[in-house]
Amino acid sequence: MPLNFTAIDFETANSSSASACSVGMVKVREGKVVDKVSWFIQPPDGHNTFLDWNVRIHGISPLHVEGAATWPEQLPDLVAFAEGDHLVAHNAGFDLGVIKTASTVTGQPVPDFQYVCSLQVARRTYHLESYRLPIAAMAAGFEDFAHHDALADAEACAAIMIHAAKRHETQTLEQLAHVTRVKIGVIGPVATSEHASLHGPMALR
């Protein structure tokens, strides 16, 4: 089986996991980037305050999300682009937590996803002083990107996984996770129950 996955990155308006204001996604097929998308998201009421700290980091303000799709409106597009792939994110607990929390807050069913954390893969692949995304991406040969731009960060994440798979001589995401001893996490009711039946109750609930 080939190295197929979708890398994903969110930027948030504030410290709430429900406050996603931008998403970037990169589709990888047979170890190569074949498609990428990004869009702004209008955070839900109660989670839509843009903190100065966050705005300074990613440059997204309320004006950018004015008229953008809400979480319930954009979630089907997110799921459709992923096409059932495992998701990959740098510090994946954060990004998958956004999907879970934003869906719950807005009354949407949490979609079923399995995922792998590129931060953990990088820690078991490179010997670096820091494993922050820009440093890990540089080790993978992906440099000079706009950090905290959701699409650029998703591209960097994909580059890390593709490079790591080559370094470990693995053909699939599952093999890479196994070789690097990185757990494949899950969210969503179906994914959680299936994962628990195979691996025990280790899922992100």
Image (spheres, rainbow, N blue to C red):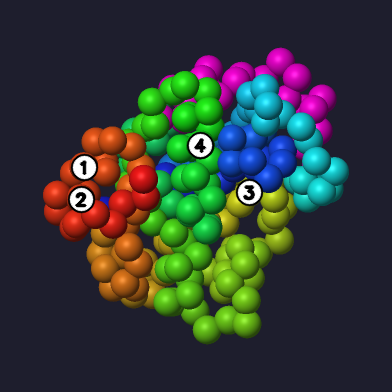
The residue labelled by disc 4 is: 101
Query: In the figure, is residue 163 to the left or right of 23?
Result: left
Q: Nearer the viewer, residue 50 or 149?
A: 50
Spot occupied by residue 1 in the image (x, y as percentages of width and height): 20, 53
- Amino acid beneath label 4: Thr
Spot occupied by residue 144 in the image (x, y as percentages of width and height): 71, 61
Whether residue 75 appears in magenta in the rendering, the answer is: yes
Query: In the figure, is residue 200 to the left or right of 11?
Result: left
Closer mark to the observer between disc 3 and disc 4: 4
In the rendered image, the quadrant that contains the C terminus is: top left
Spot occupied by residue 38 in the image (x, y as percentages of width and height): 59, 34
Which element carries disc 4, helix, strand or loop? helix
Cα distance in 3D space between marks 2 and 1: 5 Å
* Residue 61 image-quadrant placement: top right
Q: Which residues are magenta?
A: 59-79
Residue contact between numbered discs 2 and 1, judged by CB atoms under 8 Å: yes
Spot occupied by residue 187 in the image (x, y as percentages of width and height): 36, 43
Query: In the figure, is residue 101 to the left or right of 204?
Result: right
The residue labelled by disc 2 is: 196
Cα distance in 3D space between marks 2 and 3: 34 Å
The residue positioned 53% from the left and 40% from the top of the image is 98
- Amino acid beneath label 1: Ser
Question: How many neighbours does mark 1 have within 10 angstroms: few (below 14), some (14-19), or many (20 or more)?
Answer: some
The residue labelled by disc 3 is: 152
Mark 3 or mark 2, which is nearer the start of the sequence?
3
Which element carries disc 1, helix, strand or loop? helix
Closer mark to the observer between disc 2 and disc 3: 2
- Amino acid beneath label 2: Ala
Q: Is residue 170 visible?
A: no
